[in-house]
Image: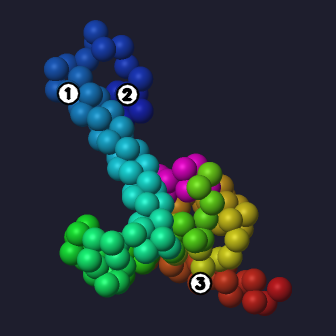
Amino acid sequence: MNFEILLNSNVDSLTEEQIGFIETHKKIIHFGNEASRSLVLMSLNLKKMSEKDYYKCAGFETFADYAESAVGLKKSQAYNFVKLCDSYSLGFLEEHENVGVTKLLLLSKLGDEETVKEVIETVNVEDKTVSELNQLVDSLKKENKEL
């Protein structure tokens, strides 16, 4: 049975396995969305921790030390989360949280939020691999330089 048809089917006409699929699929989508939202909120709080130097009162010398020891993030990951907040407004991050941190950081190379929003609206970035998106970003940057 086709995926879309299955999702829109009357439950009474489905097998136990198909019902299990639908229920599990909905949970995956739900928790995926929650995870994306949580990453945005974590990013905002990492930025606050970094900017306000709160980590110092807990005995950490640097933000990187705090991120690695207390949070379990590599230094580069922590700074990428902070950069995400520097690149986009909270509203933009909430609206596009499903795109993912890596892809949003990659898209930030294109410039302002409006430019990134246009790309997101015209290209299905969620379905693109990071490598494919990187090629697209490089191509768009090259086009901009030529204009």
Judge left or right: residue 59 versus residue 99. Answer: left
Residue at 28% of width from left, 9% of height from top? 12
Residue under label 1, please give it.
20
Q: Is residue 97 magenta?
A: yes
| Mark-to-mark CA distance, 3 and 1 | 42 Å
**Residues rendered magenta in the picture:** 92-99
Residue 134 in the image: state x and y as whole percent. Answer: 51, 78
Residue under label 3, please give it.
138
Residue lying farthest left? 16
Residue 92 in the image: state x and y as whole percent. Answer: 62, 55
> Mark 1: which amino acid?
Gly
Dot 1: element: helix
| Mark-to-mark CA distance, 3 and 2 | 37 Å
> Mark 2: which amino acid?
Leu
Residue lying farthest right? 147
Which mark, by number, is residue 7? 2
- Quadrant location of the N terminus? top left
Decide if residue 5 is in sight here.
yes
Decide if residue 102 is in sight here.
no
Which is nearer the eye, 143 or 65?
Answer: 65
> Mark 3: which amino acid?
Asp
